[in-house]
Amino acid sequence: MKKKSKSLKSAPKKTSAKSGLAQLRKEISSLDKSFLDVFRHYLKRREALAKSVGQIKKSAAMPIKDRQVEVDVQGRFVKAIGKLLDETVAAKLAKAVLKASRHQQEKA
């Protein structure tokens, strides 16, 4: 009988833990959606600006890639989010954004 009482006591804890996890996951999902909406807007705006930059560079016969600008952008990413994510992840994110921007400049 003692085993039954122990298992009965642990059953509400498991149910409570599951519902607590479900609620937290629901909140995380909502937060992720909000972040992705903002990030999507950021990328679209950056894409439009990169096209304009590409047009100016082409009309002025300037190279698309500007190493110093890319170093500066990567530094901003690492400084702003490197402690939250990890500097390596922040740098990779910056590189991905820069690659997309270069692509838009080349298409301009």
Image (tube, helix red, strand yellow):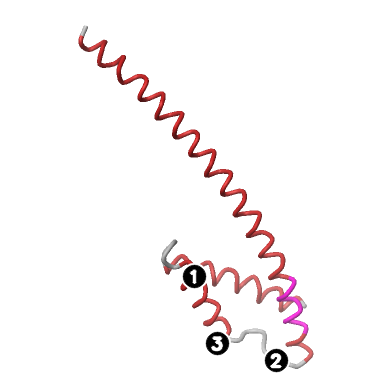
- Labels 1, 3: front one: 1
Pointer 2 or 1: first along the chain: 2
Disc 1: which residue: 80
Task: Write the residue at 73% across / 87% down.
Answer: 57
Disc 2: which residue: 62
Q: Position of residue 90 (x, y in %)?
A: 48, 67
The secondary structure type at the circle numbered 2 is loop
Q: Position of residue 7 (x, y in %)?
A: 29, 16
Pointer 3 or 2: first along the chain: 2
Structural crowding at the residue carrying mark 3, measured as other residues with C-alpha within 10 Å and reported as few (<14), some (14–19) or many (≥20):
few
Amino acid type shown at disc 3:
Gln
Prevailing secondary structure of the magenta residues: helix
- Give the quarter of the figure containing the N terminus: top left
Task: Write the residue at 68% across / 74% down.
Answer: 103
Task: Write the residue at 31% across / 14% down.
Answer: 8
- Give the quarter of the figure containing the C terminus: bottom right
Pointer 1 or 3: first along the chain: 3
- Labels 3, 2: front one: 3
- Labels 2, 1: front one: 1
* Residues at circles 2 and 1 in contact by the CB criterion of under 8 Å: no
Residue 84 occupies quadrant? bottom left
Task: Write the residue at 75% across / 71% down.
Answer: 48
Task: Using the numbered discs, state the Cα–Cα distance from disc 2 to disc 1 in whole angstroms.
Answer: 29 Å
Q: Position of residue 6 (x, y in %)?
A: 25, 16
Amino acid type shown at disc 1:
Ala
Q: Is residue 51 magenta?
A: yes
Task: Using the numbered discs, state the Cα–Cα distance from disc 3 to disc 2 in whole angstroms.
Answer: 14 Å
Q: Is residue 77 magenta?
A: no
Q: Position of residue 30 (x, y in %)?
A: 58, 44
Tag shown at residue 68:
3
Q: Which residues are magenta?
A: 48-55
Task: Using the numbered discs, state the Cα–Cα distance from disc 1 to disc 3 in whole angstroms.
Answer: 18 Å
